[in-house]
Every structure is written in C-alpha cells, then in structure tokens.
Image: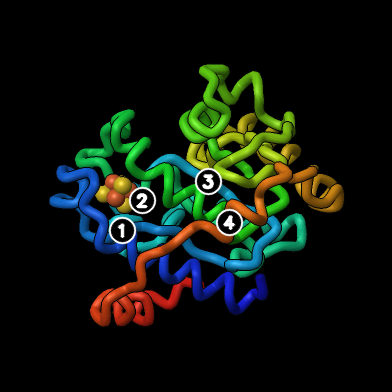
Amino acid sequence: MSAAERREELKQVLAQARGCVRCSELAATRKNVVFGAGNANADLMFIGEAPGASEDEQGLPFVGRAGKLLDTLLEEIGLARANVFIANTLKCRPPGNRDPLPVEIENCREYLYRQVELIEPIVICSLGNFSTKLLRGDPTGITRLHGRPEVIVLGRRAVRLYPIFHPAAALYTPRTLETLREDFARIPELLAQGEPEQPVSIDGMLDEVEIEQPGEEQALAVDQLGLF
Ligand code: SF4
C-alpha cells in the first residue's frame, strides 16, 4: 500500500471513530474523539491509555506538559512528532478520568488494531502500566517490563513492542525521567532491526477487510482535523 493510500484509509477509520457511539457514556460526555495524530507512514508508534481533559478539549493526543516532554525525548534521538504516530488504547475520555472499563477497551480495540495494520509500525512503545498490560494481555507491570522489547501480534500485525514509562510519570520524578531517557536511547537501535516476521496470512486477510465510507459530514470533519 502506498503512503497516500495508507493515509486515505486511515482517514476513513478516523471518520468512523468520530461518529462512534459504541460506548454510550463516553459518546455522550466526550468533546472530541481523540483518534491519534502523526505520520501515517511512521515506523514508530506510541500508545497511551486514554485522553485526558486537555486532549478531549483539543482532539489531539499528548498535549500539555507530558506531551512536551515526549517532544523533547524524541528530539534527543533525532525524531519529531511529525515522524511518529501517537494514539491511545481508548479514543474517548472516560468522565472524571476514571479507568477505562473492560467493555470500553473491547469496543475500541478494533480502531487501534486498524491503526496498527494501516500504519505498519516497526516499533510500538506502550506508555506506562495500563497500555503495556493491555497490549501484552498480561498483568506484569511497567517497572519490570520497561526497556525490554518483545515481538507481539496486534490485530494482524507483528510489531516490536517496547514498554516505557509514561512521560507524565517522569515529570516530577528525576529518577524515572533518567530511566525513560535511557530507554528512549535504545529506540533507534530497535527501529534499525526492521519489522519482525509477519503472520503468513496477513496480506490475504487485509484484502478482505471492508471499511464503511464516510458520509459528507464525516469527511468534512476529517479535513478540519487535518491530523495526518
Ligand atoms: S471509546 Fe472507542 S469504541 Fe468507545 S465510543 Fe469512543 S471511539 Fe467508540
């Protein structure tokens, strides 16, 4: 798939998500669906938990101080936001920043998997405990797992998962920041390893995936957002 085709397909998934009401409480209380932002052709993807108040307000992931720290850490390894794609496991903000419910995570999983399948990242950094546990399907926490890459399959795509501390956790704890910085420094080496071996049936299965076409209103919303 060309970069342009990839971008167009991603915009269609975005249009779908913007009209999504699978989680009735979240759909009723959100200001924006925070689909994710960045480069549709990125080799490096970051996945956090769920949008907070500022993200919900602006419709963009990782705004605020944690987002600035992420920008700084990217810069230190020669990258910028324009080179990566940032998303959350849940696209809508849980009211009062409560933890996402299992049913909400399940409802939203398809969007995340489609993002991964379309963007085809080599490395996915899970940010913090929540997304690391969710993506690995295992309760082992980030303190044990940070900085330890492993190959996992998300949807129909094999990726190099690289758990790291959440930038928000490093804002006020110099030692966590130091660890996060050390883990970041290994990202270029992981990217250089290239994509892991893919599940054999991936191409045929992807051809069978059908995506609803966005209506006129949804297409306009995509243009206004201009995320990719
Ligand atoms: S969290 Fe995901 S599945 Fe739930 S309403 Fe939002 S976009 Fe839809």
Q: What's the residue at 48%, 41% (across, down)?
A: 168
The answer to whether residue 139 is above or below residue 95 is above
Q: Which residue is under mark 2?
A: 91
- Residue 206 marker: 4
Q: Residues within 10 Å of mark 2 (few under 14, many from 20)?
A: many
- Residue 76 marker: none
| Marks 1 & 4, CB-CB < 8 Å contact | no
Q: Which residue is under mark 3?
A: 47
| Marks 1 & 2, CB-CB < 8 Å contact | yes
Residue 204: quadrant of the picture: bottom right
Q: Residues within 10 Å of mark 3 (few under 14, many from 20)?
A: many
Queried on whether the Cβ of the residue with tag 3 lies below 8 angstroms from ligand 1, the answer reads no
Q: Which amino acid does label 3 sit on?
A: Ile
Q: Is mark 4 on a helix, strand or loop?
A: helix
Q: How crowded is mark 4: few (under 14 residues within 10 Å), some or many (20 or more)?
A: few
- Residue 33 marker: 1
Between disc 1 and disc 2, whose residue precedes? 1
Residue 95 makes an appearance in the image: yes
Q: Which amino acid does label 1 sit on?
A: Val
Residue 99: quadrant of the picture: top left
- As rendered, which of 110 and 130 lies closer to the eye? 110
Tell me the CA gap for discs 2 and 3: 11 Å
Tell me the CA gap for discs 2 and 4: 23 Å
Tell me the CA gap for discs 1 and 2: 6 Å
